[in-house]
Amino acid sequence: MIGLIISLAMVLPASADSTIVPLLVDIPAGSFVMGSERGGEDADEAPLKTVRVEAFRMGATEITNAQFERFRPGHRVKRGIGGFSIEDDEAVVNVTWHDAMDYCEWLSERTGRIFRLPTEEEWEYACRAGTTTDYWTGDTLPKNMWKNQQTERDKVVVSLRVGQNPPNPWGLYDMHGNVEEWCINDYGFNGEGLTAKATRGGSHNTPVRYLRSANRSAMLADDASVMCGFRIIEVTAGNKQPVFMTPIPYVTAPDDDKVPFYSHNHQPAITYTPDGGLLAIWFSCDEESGREMVVLQSRLKPGSENWTPAELFFKVADRNVTGSSLLTLPDGSILHMNGVSDAGDWKHLALCRRFINGKTDIVAPDHDIRHQVVAGPIITKDGRILQCCDAGPGGEDGTALWVSRDWGNSWEDTGSTIAGIHAGIVELNDGALLAFGRGQSIMGEDGKPHMPYSLSRDGGYTWEYGATEFDPIGSGQRLVLRRLIEGPLMLVSFGDEGMFAALSYDEGETWPVRKLMTDGSGQVFEGGAWTGSFTMDATHAEPKGYLACTQTSDGIIHLLSSRLHYRFNLEWLEEKRSPSKNY
């Protein structure tokens, strides 16, 4: 009993408003065998697979009425529907998946920490707590933990008060029963994605076999029921060790010979998916001005060590489709932007947008300049989406900025020009916009050309320009500029010794940390596209490449070059500087 008291008395880290954070339990990193091979109606639990899960923190209980109503007071009118969940300390129910996601976003904004729903992998790993049996209690669930575990035409009212049954070995309550719990990912069976979201844990008024650790259920995202609530995880805690993983290829040949795959694969974009995986896209062609060009995709699924073989993502027959971007929106949908030519060259493009698995619309129908999409759109604090597009086909044409104020449905060209093509953009803490680009170099105080910066204080309609402290980049190179979830700005660019990352802790005024992107291993890699073969050693990194980047909520930074996927974290960047004299 003393152990239980200790687990419930954990001290939460200080935050902007720590009083609203539910009690969290540390879940250690590790691997486990996920699923079952029961077959029949449980065939969706197969096949068994070994999954690696990084450390995180999880709510000791499901979110309660009192906790949820600090975010949404109006939910109180839904208490007691069907007789269920009346008291403050009962699990909140009658919440949709979107309600649960909105709560996580609100809690993250209020505290400055990162909260979300768990993936199915995280949920089952935490539920099992090291066990391999049907329940963490063994092959049966003791009847004193049941809450009318049978199907009733008219549900029998039971208490949904949290934390009344014993916790599992890791200090988590009600992982079997009480109410089902929303997970962040789509429910899919045999690789078929459906519109439903996964739920786990089973509920009251449900046969006990549906409460097993491996059991998978689903609900439509807009559904709300007295049988479903949620618990949260905090995903940045525990991942504080420096991480730099050996780069792996994400550009892989398709299994299906009907998928077009050409000699030149280039210009990637990347985003995270709601199930905890990654989605990468890039164009494939023989000639960059060719009409054969297609956009291909590959996915890195949760727990997998390899990207899936290439599949077709976007194609308009006999049209050039240069320039792509991806952005995961707060509701979990993924926005795809792309240029489409009326011929073979990429100078005159229509600007298209689509939501994945939705229709494609043309948002700028004129085949013109200022429509060549650049990877790396961002969402501002006030909900605008900012999308950079090259302002012309030349290396000195600069970058246009497009703005959407309705989550990607309609777009406006600001009419301004950022210095340099292929620009990366960030929002500063005061609301100003900062962008770095390639070309249009500006002379520095040392009398040498430098990479330009562009600064806008009016939302991107006008810009002021100046010289950064960084060397300009050129052909075959595209930079990344983004804000990390921990707060610093990160630039990834190229110098004489290859690709490096720099960090700024003062909104771009200074960049005190620069690190060559290498583990010093002396390995030889194939960089693809215009990069070719290169050696990664103590003083050399990838010499060129078109970069794209996302950061997942566990803190891992996922950087794509023209063929390779790099994985590292802030702690690795800050650990020590590279041995090179320039860094």
Image (cartoon, helix red, strand yellow):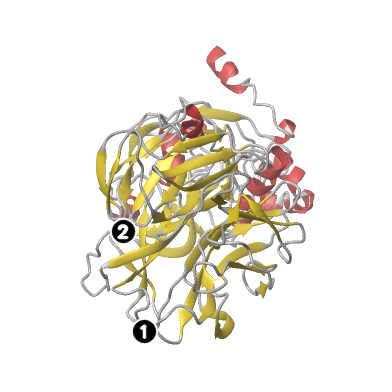
Residue at x 51% of width, y 65% of height: 374
Q: Which amino acid lies under the numbered mark 1 shown in the image of this protein?
A: Ala
Residue 241 in percent (x, y) is at: 46, 28
Q: Are marks 2 and 1 in contact (CB under 8 Å)?
A: no
In this view, 281 is above or below 135: below
In this rendered view, identify the residue nearer to me: 251 or 2.
251
Alpha carbon distance from label 2 to label 1: 22 Å
Q: Is residue 426 visible?
A: yes
Q: Which residue is mark 1?
A: 317
Residue 53 in percent (x, y) is at: 40, 37
Residue at x 43% of width, y 73% of height: 322
Q: Which amino acid lies under the numbered mark 2 shown in the image of this protein?
A: Val
Q: Residues within 10 Å of mark 2 (few under 14, many from 20)?
A: many
Q: Is residue 484 visible?
A: no
Q: Which residue is mark 2?
A: 251
Numbered disc 2: secondary structure:
loop
**Residue 91 in the figure: left or right of residue 19:** left
**N-terminal of the two: label 2 or label 1?**
2
Residue 62 in percent (x, y) is at: 60, 39
Numbered disc 1: secondary structure:
loop
In this view, 252 is above or below 499: below
In this rendered view, identify the residue nearer to me: 198 or 217.
198
In this rendered view, identify the residue nearer to me: 391 or 74.
391
**Residue 465 in the figure: left or right of residue 146:** right
**Residue 173 in the figure: left or right of residue 381:** left
